[in-house]
Image (tube, rainbow, N blue to C red):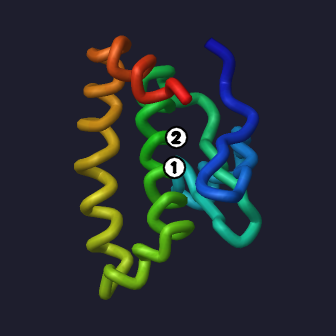
Amino acid sequence: MRFPSSVKIGAMRFAVRRAPHLAELGKEAITSARTQEVLVQPGQAPSYERDTILHEILHAVIAETGLSAWFSDQDKEEEMVLVLAPALLEVLRENPALVRYLCEK
Protein backbone atom coordinates (compact mmCIF):
# COMPACT_ATOMS: atom_id res chain seq x y z
CA MET A 1 0.00 0.00 0.00
CA ARG A 2 1.26 3.46 -0.89
CA PHE A 3 2.05 6.12 1.69
CA PRO A 4 -0.81 8.66 1.64
CA SER A 5 -0.02 12.07 0.15
CA SER A 6 -2.96 13.77 1.83
CA VAL A 7 -5.96 13.22 4.07
CA LYS A 8 -9.21 15.17 4.19
CA ILE A 9 -10.25 16.14 7.71
CA GLY A 10 -13.47 18.09 7.90
CA ALA A 11 -13.32 20.80 5.25
CA MET A 12 -9.51 20.77 5.16
CA ARG A 13 -7.05 18.68 3.17
CA PHE A 14 -3.86 17.96 5.09
CA ALA A 15 -0.67 17.07 3.22
CA VAL A 16 1.03 13.95 4.61
CA ARG A 17 4.80 13.89 4.23
CA ARG A 18 7.84 12.14 5.57
CA ALA A 19 10.10 14.69 7.24
CA PRO A 20 13.66 13.58 8.12
CA HIS A 21 14.28 16.70 10.25
CA LEU A 22 11.84 15.43 12.90
CA ALA A 23 14.53 13.08 14.23
CA GLU A 24 16.63 16.10 15.17
CA LEU A 25 13.64 17.49 17.09
CA GLY A 26 13.06 14.17 18.87
CA LYS A 27 9.61 13.87 17.31
CA GLU A 28 8.06 10.90 15.52
CA ALA A 29 5.43 13.13 13.92
CA ILE A 30 3.91 16.59 14.03
CA THR A 31 0.53 17.86 12.88
CA SER A 32 -0.14 21.51 12.12
CA ALA A 33 -3.71 22.65 11.58
CA ARG A 34 -2.34 26.08 10.59
CA THR A 35 -0.26 24.72 7.70
CA GLN A 36 -2.52 21.70 7.13
CA GLU A 37 0.34 19.21 7.34
CA VAL A 38 0.99 15.86 8.94
CA LEU A 39 4.75 15.30 9.05
CA VAL A 40 6.07 11.83 9.86
CA GLN A 41 9.62 10.81 10.68
CA PRO A 42 10.84 8.33 8.03
CA GLY A 43 12.26 4.95 8.93
CA GLN A 44 9.43 3.77 11.16
CA ALA A 45 8.31 0.16 10.78
CA PRO A 46 5.22 0.05 8.52
CA SER A 47 2.79 -0.95 11.28
CA TYR A 48 4.22 1.68 13.62
CA GLU A 49 4.04 4.33 10.90
CA ARG A 50 0.36 3.54 10.34
CA ASP A 51 -0.31 3.97 14.05
CA THR A 52 1.66 7.25 14.01
CA ILE A 53 -0.35 8.61 11.07
CA LEU A 54 -3.67 7.69 12.71
CA HIS A 55 -2.42 9.27 15.95
CA GLU A 56 -1.70 12.52 14.11
CA ILE A 57 -5.02 12.39 12.26
CA LEU A 58 -6.79 12.17 15.62
CA HIS A 59 -4.94 15.32 16.75
CA ALA A 60 -6.06 17.05 13.54
CA VAL A 61 -9.68 15.94 14.07
CA ILE A 62 -9.54 17.33 17.61
CA ALA A 63 -8.17 20.64 16.31
CA GLU A 64 -10.59 20.91 13.38
CA THR A 65 -13.68 20.14 15.49
CA GLY A 66 -12.78 22.59 18.24
CA LEU A 67 -12.32 19.84 20.81
CA SER A 68 -8.90 21.25 21.70
CA ALA A 69 -10.72 23.71 23.98
CA TRP A 70 -11.92 20.76 26.10
CA PHE A 71 -8.38 19.93 27.14
CA SER A 72 -6.95 22.14 29.88
CA ASP A 73 -3.47 21.06 28.89
CA GLN A 74 -1.85 19.38 25.91
CA ASP A 75 -0.84 16.35 27.99
CA LYS A 76 -4.47 15.25 28.46
CA GLU A 77 -5.11 15.34 24.73
CA GLU A 78 -1.90 13.40 24.10
CA GLU A 79 -2.85 10.75 26.70
CA MET A 80 -6.24 10.25 25.07
CA VAL A 81 -4.80 10.03 21.54
CA LEU A 82 -2.08 7.60 22.70
CA VAL A 83 -4.80 5.23 23.92
CA LEU A 84 -7.29 5.73 21.08
CA ALA A 85 -5.02 5.47 18.02
CA PRO A 86 -3.80 1.87 18.45
CA ALA A 87 -7.23 0.68 19.64
CA LEU A 88 -9.02 2.30 16.69
CA LEU A 89 -6.40 1.03 14.24
CA GLU A 90 -6.90 -2.52 15.53
CA VAL A 91 -10.70 -2.24 15.15
CA LEU A 92 -10.26 -1.04 11.56
CA ARG A 93 -7.69 -3.74 10.71
CA GLU A 94 -9.71 -6.58 12.19
CA ASN A 95 -13.02 -5.54 10.65
CA PRO A 96 -12.59 -4.86 6.91
CA ALA A 97 -16.31 -5.38 6.29
CA LEU A 98 -17.05 -2.65 8.82
CA VAL A 99 -14.57 -0.33 7.09
CA ARG A 100 -16.23 -0.96 3.72
CA TYR A 101 -19.66 -0.32 5.30
CA LEU A 102 -18.51 2.89 6.98
CA CYS A 103 -16.96 4.15 3.75
CA GLU A 104 -20.14 3.74 1.68
CA LYS A 105 -21.81 7.00 0.70
* Mark in the foreground, 2 or 1: 1
Q: Secondary structure at mark 2?
A: helix
Against 3, residue 57 (above or below) is below
Label count reads 2
Q: Is residue 29 left or right of residue 73?
A: right
Mark 2–mark 1 Cα distance, whole angstroms, equals 6 Å
Residue type marked 1? Ile
Which residue is found at the position 26% from the left and 27% from the top? 91
Q: Position of residue 37 (x, y in %)?
A: 71, 55
Q: Position of residue 67 (x, y in %)?
A: 41, 74
Q: Is residue 47 left or right of residue 39?
A: left
> In which quadrant will I find the N terminus?
top right
- Pointer 2: what residue? 53
Query: In which quarter of the view is residue 12 placed?
Result: bottom right
The 10 Å Cα crowd at callout 1, few under 14, some 14 to 19, many 20 or more, is: many
Q: Position of residue 105 (x, y in %)?
A: 55, 29
Nearer the observer, 93 or 56: 93
Nearer the observer, 47 or 91: 91
Q: Is residue 35 left or right of residue 57?
A: right
Residue type marked 2? Ile
- Specify the label residue 57 is tagged with: 1
